[in-house]
Image (spheres, helix red, strand yellow):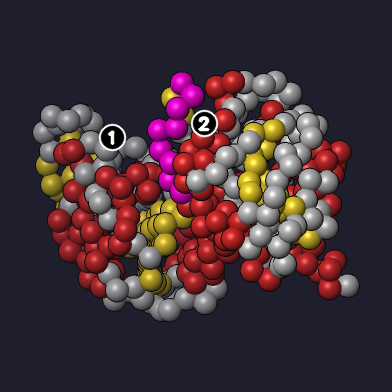
Amino acid sequence: MLTMDSVLLQDKWVLIREDFNVPMNQGKITHTARIDAALPTLKKALALGAKVIVMSHLGRPTEGTFDPLLSLKPIAKYLETCLKQQVPVFALGENKPALKQGELALLENVRFLPGEEQNDTTLATQLAALCDVFVMDAFAVAHRSQASTCGVAKYAPIACAGPLLQSELQAIRKVLVAPQRPVVAIVGGSKVSSKLKLLNNLLSKVDTLVVGGGIANTFLAAMDLPIGESLYEASLVSTAKSLLEKAKSLGKTIWLPKDVVVAKTLSEDASTTIKPCEAVNGQDKIFDIGPESLASLKTCLSQAKTILWNGPVGVFECKPFAKGTQSLALMISESNAFTVAGGGDTLAAAEQFYVSNNISYLSTGGGAFLEALEGKILPAVAALESKAKEKVL
């Protein structure tokens, strides 16, 4: 696909799709990380003399209805501070602001527009008419086939990938396509069902697949180990067995805990016990991995050249059960490997344990990150590739 760096932007109308879906409280931004991540792209386009229009969604408004609490006006105010220029906000159908080279305007929330989520052709052509060049830079919505992600790419004169989208795709490529080996992937979380496609795809790509959290309980049950009253998915025990057998046939390792932290209740004042997996019984509930497991994990990660982290290995939000995920986070941050972390809980854990700055790449992609790791072709990426082929022809 074309990239923004390869396209002439001077004196062009450049429409950039970003992800400004930031947390808001009564019209005030509470966390600016997603906007901050997009600033280098915007500053580069402005410095190259483009007339920039930025578009994004915010929240889940009712299509066709303006909701003042989900207006992008607070984001425009924040951009004004960052870019040190006025940032007008306009709605589709209104006249474009009369921008000069190096100036920027913000299109109002695209999810106010009827047809956005259905990738409506009329809406896509209206968006494309705003620009000479469309830049898709919002990886977090690259898995959505919508008018502002895919449709506009089809109808814009030129469509290309922005630096943020490129960096996400490159990080995933460095893990799945051309990694330095050994590759270790850590997949945690509560349910096998939500990570089944991911586990299947990763097993053929990595050398060691570390399984933690509630997902590990289902695998322990598949190995006929006792799990007491721990959270697990009985209907997927046979699936877990199949994955264990698949790993064996591929010569891959599925890492599972050797000891666990158990309690009767999930609470801040819970009475905890460390037990070997074989000794879990009765009313025990597994909420974290134990010290022997952590020592084994440290050995595993110390040999890795590439590490992917998606999901916690325990209920880290609750202090008695945070040590496993905290220790894992520190191991990853201290590793010399190329490290990639993504997913909501993973980023929350990285932030909680102050390791975000020591991870090679933090993906803010959420669902798009997961789908890319599952091996799916992201619709917005496919649209950019198709557009590039059209230009070549």
Residue 254 lies left or right of residue 45; in this view the side is: left
- In the picture shown, does residue 390 fall above or below 329? below
- In the picture shown, does residue 82 fall above or below 167? above
User: Is label 2 or label 1 in front?
Assistant: 2
Return the x and y of residue 288 as percentages of the image width and height: 23, 46
Q: Label 1 is placed on what type of residue?
A: Glu
Residue 215 lies left or right of residue 44; in this view the side is: left
| Residue position marked by numbered label 1 in the rendering | 229
Number of the label disc, if any, that sits on residue 299:
none
What kind of element bears circle 1? Answer: loop
What range of the chain is rendered magenta?
A: 26-36
Identify the residue shown where x is 68% and y is 71%: 6
Return the x and y of residue 169 as percentages of the image width and height: 56, 64
- In the picture shown, does residue 316 fall above or below 207? above
Within 10 Å of disc 2 (Cα), the crowding (few <14, some 14-19, many 20+) is some
Q: How far apart are marks 2 and 1 (CA)?
A: 47 Å
Question: Which residue is at the front of the view, 242 or 198?
Answer: 198
- Kindly tell me whether residue 96 is visible in this rendering: yes
Return the x and y of residue 49 as percentages of the image width and height: 66, 60
What kind of element bears circle 2? Answer: helix
| Residue position marked by numbered label 2 in the rendering | 74
Q: Do the residues labelled 2 and 1 touch (CB within 8 Å)?
A: no
Q: Is residue 29 magenta?
A: yes
Residue 101 lies left or right of residue 281; in this view the side is: right
- The quadrant holding residue 62 is top right
Identify the residue shown where x is 23% and y is 31%: 266
Q: Label 2 is placed on what type of residue?
A: Pro
